[in-house]
Amino acid sequence: MPYTPHGSAMLTNALARNRLGVASVVFFVMSAAAPLTVVAGVVPTGLAVTGLTAISIAFVTVALVLAVFSVGYVAMARHIANAGAFYAYVSRGLGRPLGVAAAWVALAAYNSFQVASYGGIGAIAAPLFAEWFGIQPPWWLIALAAWALVAVLGVRDVAVNGKVLATLLVAEIILVVLFSFADLTTAGFVPSAAPLDPGGLAGAGAGALLVMAVTGFVGFEQSVVFSEESRDPRRTVPRATYLSILLITALYAFSAWAMISAAGPDAVHRATTEGPELFFTLPAAQLGDLAVDLGHALFLTSLIAAMISFHNIIARYTFSLGREGVLPRTFGRTVPATGAPKNGSLAQSAFGLLVILTYALLGWDPLVQLFFWGGTTGALGVLLLITVTSAAVIGFFLRTPCDETLWRRAIAPTCGTLLLLAITTAAFTTIATLFGVTPGSPPTWTVPLAYTLLAAAGATWALTLRLTRPTTYEGIGWGARSTRFHPTEDPPPTDPQPTDPQLSDSRPGDSQLTDPQLSDSRPGDLQPIDSRPGGSQPGDLQPMDSRPVGPQPGDLQPMDSRPGGSQPGDFRPSDSPRGTIPDTSDSRPSNSPANAAPDITVPLSAAPSSNLPGTNVAAYGVPSTGVPSTGVPGGGAPGGVSLSNGGRPSDPRDHDVSGGDTPGGAQ
């Protein structure tokens, strides 16, 4: 499909640019990972569900796999900046149908994480409120309060969200480190090698343990979602990705080791009976009740931070799909002042509200059936997406010539794909263990079936677009550049002006063309006299040197040649003339009737301001009526219009009325 310099689908809405640095992106990524939620929730759950204590080495193993995957992932990010992330990468690497299939799966997976957090905060906060304040509101009321906060922040500037997340994330990381060091001073602490023993991953529950470890890293891959809003994304995205993996791994591995070592030989039993409270009760003797209450409070804010982060991720996926026409284009709009993807954010908020109200009305368990099952469902979906994207990296670099090394474009992506396939296979073969249900229970088959149907629906929709809206199909995965494809199903553009003044060749004082798409002469052009029918016409502007010596009535004269030099309202010559104008002096006889004072029509429209206050030149022509010949001695337009060489520019864009000091030109 051919490209056009300015497609008719030129976007007027876009995400905010240059808002996020490495630190801000890391805050978004680690907030989605929710360190406190993982350490206090996932680690005890992993101990209880699998009966294995090799959690620290599981985190390290998963980190190594994801680091290998990230080599090709961030290399591809240097060539693609798209808020659609997985969707865009799969589209460009494995084809558009699979890309849209990945988009559908991504929306389902990240929405599962996001709405699961509502169930978690409601169910966990309700008993804490009873302990702290003597009242126990229903879980859904607390969830609605969190929902309202997330909905408001979702339509705010991404930098505001980043500051909120930074505050919450720093607080919870400090608390995790503080509690973990307190574990080292407990009476029952005995350094244990079991959490770091690779042999512990050989047990029956090793696959489930690795998948739970993957859950702790969910969000690291979303550094590329913010590439369009990052400063220098070619550097910001790789640095944020690797730094996030390193920080998450160190925090999780150390905290899990300290917790298991402090719990002693019966760590599995205590995790089974106490659950997430194990993290808080172990250091309670050293830190006191106040620290434990603070830990519980930050556990809730950790969930809020995860909600905000996932909400932003989902809104940007939706924006990307709307911008390219895969979803209704209304989702591709942003708030003008902040660049926030408003409609995508509102859609996610509406879905979250629907889930909360549904669970509340039907009386479903918010902790198990929403928080635990929803989080596990999201983890499986993201694991699928990472695996498919790793294969897409290989496909992209096979199709795209580039200067990336062989390690980045082939070896690392291939190794990462094979390792991720092994983990994904283990995840779906141990799915009953992951959900904590018996084999054959509804979650064990409904979740894989749902993802299969969503992927099939996405691919079918892409093929439908290929048949019904081929230009939309061609733009899939290209982000903002998708608008460069000829949109044959859309009307042509009506605005000839460049949307970005930095991309325009015009300068202050330039005359603007009314139709920049045509390179030949058009109605209203000042043409060489000998190129028009019948030679000279009434009202022609003639080079002064081709007429009788001395100024004639109606001449446009050089400013310094008029009485008193320059006059008020003169159009000043620009610093450098634009283009050259054919010399047509030999075609005009000295007795041409056009020596009479011409009438010049000067539309006062959108050209940049000149030195004449209140007057701009957007186009010029030679009609028989126009502006009265007043304003300076000798007639002409008020203030005089300076022209280069007395004719028409050679470049159709350069209707420059500045002229400068071009020799022989009438100014």
Image (tube, rainbow, N blue to C red):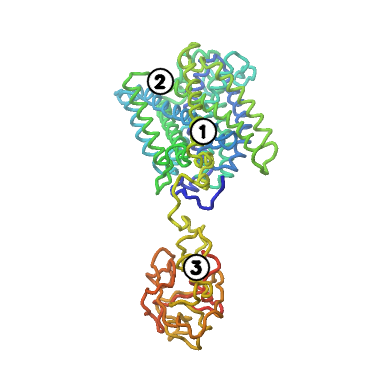
Q: Earlier in the sequence, mark 1 or mark 2?
A: 2
Image coords of residue 267 (percent x, y): 53, 15
Asked which quadrant contains residue 563, the reply is: bottom left
Q: Secondary structure at mark 2?
A: helix
Mark 2 residue type: Leu
Q: Earlier in the sequence, mark 1 or mark 3?
A: 1
- How packed mark 1 is, by other alpha carbons closer than 10 Å (few <14, some 14-19, many 20 or more), is some
Q: CA distance from mark 1 to mark 2?
A: 39 Å
Mark 1 residue type: Leu
| Residue drawn at point x = 38 percent, y = 30 percent | 352
Viewer-side residue, 572 vs 177: 572
| Residue drawn at point x = 31 percent, y = 21 percent | 361
Viewer-side residue, 656 vs 547: 547
Q: CA distance from mark 3 to mark 2?
A: 69 Å
Image coords of residue 562 (percent x, y): 45, 84
Asked which quadrant contains residue 570, the reply is: bottom left
User: Which residue does the numbered mark 2 point to in the structure image?
Assistant: 367
Circle 1/circle 2 CB separation < 8 Å: no
Mark 3 residue type: His
User: Which residue does the numbered mark 3 point to in the structure image?
Assistant: 655
Image coords of residue 338 (percent x, y): 41, 47
Residue at the extreme bottom: 549
Q: Secondary structure at mark 1?
A: helix
Q: CA distance from mark 1 to mark 3?
A: 47 Å
